[in-house]
Amino acid sequence: MIQKVIIADHGDAAVRLLWQFKRAGVKTVTVYTEEDYGSAHVALGDDSICIGKALRCYITRWDRIISAAEITGANAIHPGDGPLSTDGRFIKVCGEIGLQLLGRNAEQDDFT
């Protein structure tokens, strides 16, 4: 059962995901960078954690996203539909630590 989910995306895509999880009664954690601090998705999450300075951190510093999940007690992550959702190493690490991966990933083409 999903109790708290990390939204590892930003902008409009993150806002849509946040509303979906909120309607389902799931607590949310948003990650953000200094570049997108004032964005709507940051304000809408139940918790939020800064993962770095530049937007590229969403792809290159996924270790920080994993750390955010551990810090906040999230048991699931939605990486959006960008490069992170198909990063084999990221997907493997999520499985190894028991972090449920939601959305599209390397093994499936449809959103779950």
Image (tube, grey):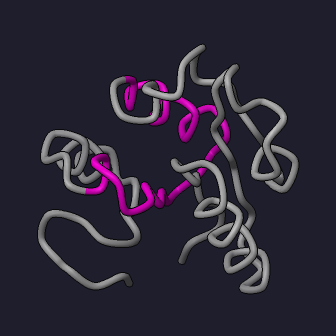
Q: How many marks?
A: 0
Q: Quadrant of residue 100?
A: bottom left
Q: Quadrant of residue 15?
A: bottom right
Q: Residue 89's spot in the image, x, y percent?
A: 15, 39
Q: Residue 35's spot in the image, x, y percent?
A: 67, 23
Instruction: Please give the name of the residue rendered at 43% of the width and 26% of the height, measured from the top-left corner.
Output: 56
Q: Residue 21's spot in the image, x, y percent?
A: 68, 75
| Magenta-colored stretch includes residue 108 | no
Q: Is residue 103 above or below residue 84?
A: below
Instruction: Please give the name of the residue rendered at 72% of the width and 85% of the height, measured from the top-left corner.
Output: 24
Single out the residue that lies furthest toward the top: 53
Instruction: Please give the name of the residue rendered at 30% of the width and 71% of the height, measured from the top-left corner.
Output: 104
Q: Quadrant of residue 13?
A: bottom right
Q: Which residues are magenta?
A: 61-85
Left or right: 107, with 11 as reference point: left
Q: Is residue 60 above or below residue 29?
A: above
Instruction: Please give the name of the residue rendered at 19% of the width and 46% of the height, measured from the top-left corner.
Output: 87
Left or right: 11, with 98 as reference point: right
Q: Nearer the viewer, residue 97 or 41?
A: 41
Q: Quadrant of the C terminus?
A: bottom left
